[in-house]
Image (cartoon, helix red, strand yellow):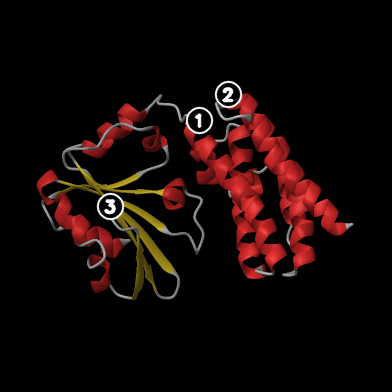
Amino acid sequence: METAVQFFSRDPAVIGIFLGGSLAAGSADAFSDIDLRVVVQPDRHASYVDRRREIPKAWPGFLFNEWVPGAQHCVSHFRPFGKIDIFYYSAATLTPSPWYRLPIRIFLDPQGVVADLVEQAKGLPFTVDPDDVDFSISKGLAAAHETYRRAMRGELFFAQTLLDEMRQHIMQADDWLNDRTPESAAVAKFEHRASREVNAVLLASYRQCGADEILAALRLLVPFYRQQVMALHEKFRLPRPVANDLEALDIISFETASDRN
């Protein structure tokens, strides 16, 4: 972190450097990553985005990058297990957001740009976009169906990864249904903030890599996810037909029960 801050501070085009995530929140441990944000003058922003993969390579201990094409950030890994996630923001496009209500540590802010964002963010609520819920349900249902299909085809490793994807949507639904915001996630890992029932069903769903074991895990998760889907429909008044979603899960329950018999 010190290396990165010193590097960016030398460039007058960088007018803001601040830290987010668990380090800023005071909940970090030895394996936490570094969430660094760099605010750049508009005329130099594209240059930094273009060089986002090259800049960390010159820093001591560099191992490898991971990135998304077209994105404005890069995640860099350092030996032995260091990890820094750097987002590059253009000063021209910065707008107030509830995300700036989360704990922030400012390293550089000569023009008060970051401090102004933090001030304007006060009182802005985190809201859940129904489209995000809609998308999550579709992905959760797809993961459940694909788990069944792949297990029946004997593609067991693939089926296990799909079960994990379904678990992710169960975890997300639990946060939404209990009105947990990113502020909750910043200070408490899911295992510590989750509903007791969710923790129990997730723990019980981990099985050996065999078709019968995977189908048994699916039988355990599907009825629980069905309850969550019904609750999500009721809470967010989703336009998608609830009957279709429930039928998609009931089909799996019926088929896995038939396979067991």
Image coordinates of residue 12 in percent, x first then y, are: 10, 51
- Amino acid type, residue under disc 1 in the picture: Pro
The picture places residue 50, in percent across and down from the top left corner, at 19, 59
- Give the camera-side residue of 184 and 68: 68
Vertical order, 194 against 257 (above or below): above
Q: Nearer the viewer, residue 75 or 50?
A: 50
Q: Position of 203 compared to 6: left or right?
A: right
Residue 170, by quadrant, is top right
Q: Which residue is mark 2?
A: 237
Q: Is residue 261 above or below residue 53?
A: above
Q: Residue at x 74, y 45 (%)?
A: 251
**Residue 189 in the image, given as x and y percentages of width and height:** 58, 50
Q: Residue at x 40, y 75 (%)?
A: 79
Q: Quarter of the image for the C terminus: give it.
A: bottom right
Q: Amino acid at mark 2?
A: Arg
User: Identity of the amino acid at label 3?
Assistant: Gln
Query: Badge 3: how crowded within 10 Å, few (<14), some, or many (20+)?
Result: some
Residue at the image position 46 percent from the left and 51 percent from the top? 22
**For the residues marked 2 and 1, what is the alpha-carbon distance in whole angstroms?**
8 Å
Tag 2 near tag 1, CB within 8 Å: yes
Q: Residues within 10 Å of mark 1 (few under 14, many from 20)?
A: some
SS category of the residue bearing label 2: loop
User: Of callouts 1 and 3, which one flags the residue occurring earlier in the amino acid sequence?
Assistant: 3
Task: Name the residue carrying label 3.
Answer: 72
- 217 sits left or right of 238 in the view: right
